[in-house]
Amino acid sequence: MPRQKVSREFILHQSLKIFRQKSFYNTTTSDIAAACGLQKGSLYHYFPSKEAIMIEVINYVHDFFSKEIFVHAYNEKLGAKQRLEYIIDLTEDIFIGPDGGDVMGNIGVETARVVPEFAAPIRSFFIDWKNALSFIFKSEYDEEIAAEYAEQSVAEIEGSILMMRIFNDPEILKRTHTRVLKKLKK
């Protein structure tokens, strides 16, 4: 028998897993409801639409990365290379792990032109990622070069996540992370 009550966070967590597996367009509200142990109609007590769930999932992921990963870029008790290594280790755990996947990149590409309300929160996530890396690179480079290296790094990491999935080879992401680390001299 389906559960009667669940938390919004539980729904977001389950939705994230399904969106990673099936993509936004291939996921139905019935899929989400079933994963949460709810009747489809009950899901609408929590969220008015699949799009509303996705926006919350994007914000949920962004909040997680901000509090658990990006924050380490600003810990000046550690050296720049240590901060970058720490961020790399954390992101590899997420992107390479069994539940891994790049929901921001995937949803961004999948919906960029057809669901405009997703664009701003996804863009905000990538801006925060670039800013975190730029802050680290500023320990060795001027602001312009640091920003350029940060943008290159995020773009290369995103591309390597895609290639890693296509070729089922986590070493692709690891090699990219090694190249990103080499941008720091110390």
Image (cartoon, rainbow, N blue to C red):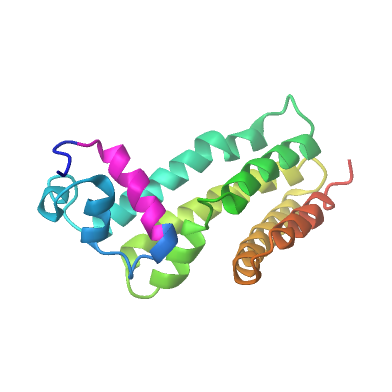
Tell me which residue sits at (83%, 47%) in the image. Answer: 184
- Looking at the image, residue 154 sits to the left or right of residue 116; the answer is right
The quarter holding residue 118 reads bottom left
Name the residue rendered at 62%, 45% in the picture: 93
Q: Which residue lies furthest to the top in this view?
A: 77
The range drawn in magenta is 6-19
* Residue 38 x %, y %: 18, 47
Q: Does the magenta stretch include residue 9?
A: yes
Q: Describe residue 69's horizontal placement relative to residue 176 as left or right.
A: left
Q: Which of 44 and 14 lies nearest the eye of the viewer? A: 14
Magenta span: predominant SS is: helix
Residue 63 on image: x %, y %: 44, 40
Q: Quadrant of the N terminus?
A: top left
Q: Name the spot of residue 159 as percent of width and height, x first.
A: 64, 67
Residue found farthest to the right: 185
Q: Where is residue 32 in the image (x, y as percent from the top left)?
A: 27, 54
The extreme front residue here reads 1
Q: In this view, does 43 lie to the left or right of 116?
A: left
Judging depth in this view, the residue of 149 and 48 nearest the camera is 48
> Is 48 drawn above or below residue 73 in the view shown?
below
Furthest-bottom residue in view? 113
The residue shown at (69%, 63%) is 169
Q: In which quarter of the image is the C terminus?
A: top right
Front position in the image: 54 or 118: 54
**Of the pair 40 and 113, the residue shown nearer to us:** 40
Counting labels gives: 0
Up/down of 177 relative to 85, above or below: below
* Rendering quarter of residue 55: bottom left
